[in-house]
Amino acid sequence: MANIRDLAKEAGVSVATVSRVLNGYPYVSEEKRKAVWEAVEKLNYTKNIQAVHLAKGRTAIVGVMLPYIHHPYFSAIMEGISKEALRYGYQLLLFQTNYDVERELEALERLRMRQMDGLIVCSHEVDWEAFAAYQGDGPIVLCEHVGEHDFFAVYIDHYQAFVQALRYLVKKGHRRIGYCIGRMTGPNSQARAAAYQDVLREAGVIPRRQWIFEGCLFLEDGKRVIEQWVAMEERPSALLVTSDQVAAGIVLQAQRIGVRIPEELSIIGFDNDPLAELLGITTVALPHFQLGGKAFRLIHHWLETGNVTRKQEELPARLLVRDTA
Amino acid sequence: MANIRDLAKEAGVSVATVSRVLNGYPYVSEEKRKAVWEAVEKLNYTKNIQAVHLAKGRTAIVGVMLPYIHHPYFSAIMEGISKEALRYGYQLLLFQTNYDVERELEALERLRMRQMDGLIVCSHEVDWEAFAAYQGDGPIVLCEHVGEHDFFAVYIDHYQAFVQALRYLVKKGHRRIGYCIGRMTGPNSQARAAAYQDVLREAGVIPRRQWIFEGCLFLEDGKRVIEQWVAMEERPSALLVTSDQVAAGIVLQAQRIGVRIPEELSIIGFDNDPLAELLGITTVALPHFQLGGKAFRLIHHWLETGNVTRKQEELPARLLVRDTA
DNA sequence: TTGTAGGCGTTATCAC
DNA sequence: GTGATAACGCCTACAA
């Protein structure tokens, strides 16, 4: 593989001139410029990007940490990130963690090792102290509400989103309300739990522990939920379901086993997945795609300018009433 | 940021010794080893991975080229790749191309620049010559049947898979058979087209151009298909749908607008998506996850050993008869 | 407008 | 066992 020195020799110039030509700097005579490009052609030269990274101390790579890529929620965020990354000429390094703390820490270590210039954290298990410890190693953007903590963050106000949906149900006369969620940990989930407590209390209803369904991430989980629901003695009359995939699973399986929705059970999903639209599922639309895009731009802006206008950005969620609630 | 020389000074040894300790080589006295680790601790040292890459000439990064990550088909492959990559300590660099030839070539250029050690191509628009031109720059694995061409490849025999499903329909008495596909280009699609021609001819039926629905990738496309179907003068009685997402879109919208499936229209999907299972859609199960895993292992084996046992691997597809055909 | 030389942080090859 | 020192390939003052 030819290198910059070979080019210099071939073109009869210095490596500095070669570098200038390669990077499009001015102040190079047309003659030498031409000679360099000819040498590039002749020697079939390509830049070694590793060397560029080392010399510049930057990689134009951003890492993305997420639990699983094979999930509509995360792949939507990823799509948003990807689009912006492409636009600004950045590469994306994927860290699929499966919510395994070891792997999450590995991703942070990689930031420290300068494998990438910044990191977008779509979701995580490890607690904030871990991120705080790596803040000096490059910009880290979290996709969740971080309150007073000094992190870059772009997030949906899940407390408000939940309140919105719960109030709607209460207004419709529901008193026995439950919800389905992926995990109980993490700020997003805790915001939802708080909203659940608050709104139900405000409506004079006692929240019930057994009406909270955990581990709801995929379509199949919805199937499980409705089957559990059927088996319950005291059934909720309405369910908030934090993923449209799961909501779809509930609705479809309900249809199969003869549970009438919304008559027997009202369902409000989240995301506004195309599947929810097709099934007429009432849902809280969440701007995942934009969220990914904003996350990237936050990092990018910091990397390119070194200063911050906003550290945190909030995105809106809105209820789309359809047929299931 | 402390570097290896700072460590050497701090520990009172040479950089060579530091490197040996850091990389766990033998022949270092216990005493010096300890001194080095203490220096690491004291200076809060972390390896600069860029420098390692440059010095070693390898990155332990594999690139993944795919059109869109936000699609169950590709994210399933990605999940399979990801799992294996993790297992062997490799990182994954994502190239989302949107089937844009420019971006596909950009990914290949990056391989050439040594940004990664190898490349997995999940799907592409550019023709094979392009890949051939970059073969010297690192292992490239294609996820499609490459025939006699000398590429690494792991693939599903889409010709056979299509034949299998078509014969089933013919046997059931169908004569007016159509199909839905993402794009017409690419070897996978061409294999399907060939199977379509062959099986229908063999059954004494004339294939019809207007019974082939292009641009079928997402759930929403299924909705469009069934609406087109309804508007047709001569309607096919059965449709092969190369994505369960699209098949689900068809089935759900059919249900909405009162088209009975399978009585009026039989549907066979592909993938064996959980959604197809939940909807009782007859489908051809495709092992995407394994495909991704195998693709990675092919690259990995080549990178680690430098020799090849198999250049190509075929994976099976099997028809799962459920309710829609 | 051009060239020299030092630096980026490791690894790896020699001698000792 | 250990330490110099030369790669790895590029960028970038600084000097001319």
Image (tube, coloured by chain):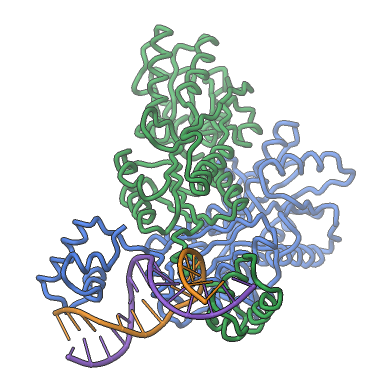
Chain colours: A green, B blue, C purple, D orange
The image quadrant that residue B165 belongs to is bottom right
Percent x, y of residue A312: 47, 33
The structure residue drawn at horizontal position 10% and vertical position 71%, both measured from the top left corner, is B30
Residue B42 is left or right of residue A251, and the answer is left
Q: Residue lying farthest top?
A: A204
Can see residue B314? no
Going by the image, does A130 lie left or right of B174? left
Of residues A157 and A7, the one nearer the viewer is A7
Specify whether B131 is left or right of B86. Answer: right
Tell me which corner region of the image, top left, top right, bottom left or bottom right, holds residue A256: top right
Residue closest to the far right: B233
Q: Which residue is drawn at 61% across and 48% down?
A: A83
Q: Where is residue C6 in the image (x, y as percent from the top left)?
A: 38, 72
Residue B196 relative to residue A20: left or right: right
Q: In which quarter of the image is the C terminus of chain A?
A: top right
Would you place residue A184 above or below residue B54 in this image?
Answer: above
**Residue occupying the point 67% across, 80% down:** A35
Q: Using the image as rendered, state which of residue B31 and residue B199 is in the foreground.
A: B31
Residue B201: tell me if it is visible: yes
Q: Is residue A173 above or below residue B162?
A: above
Examine the image and state in which quarter residue A115 appears: bottom left
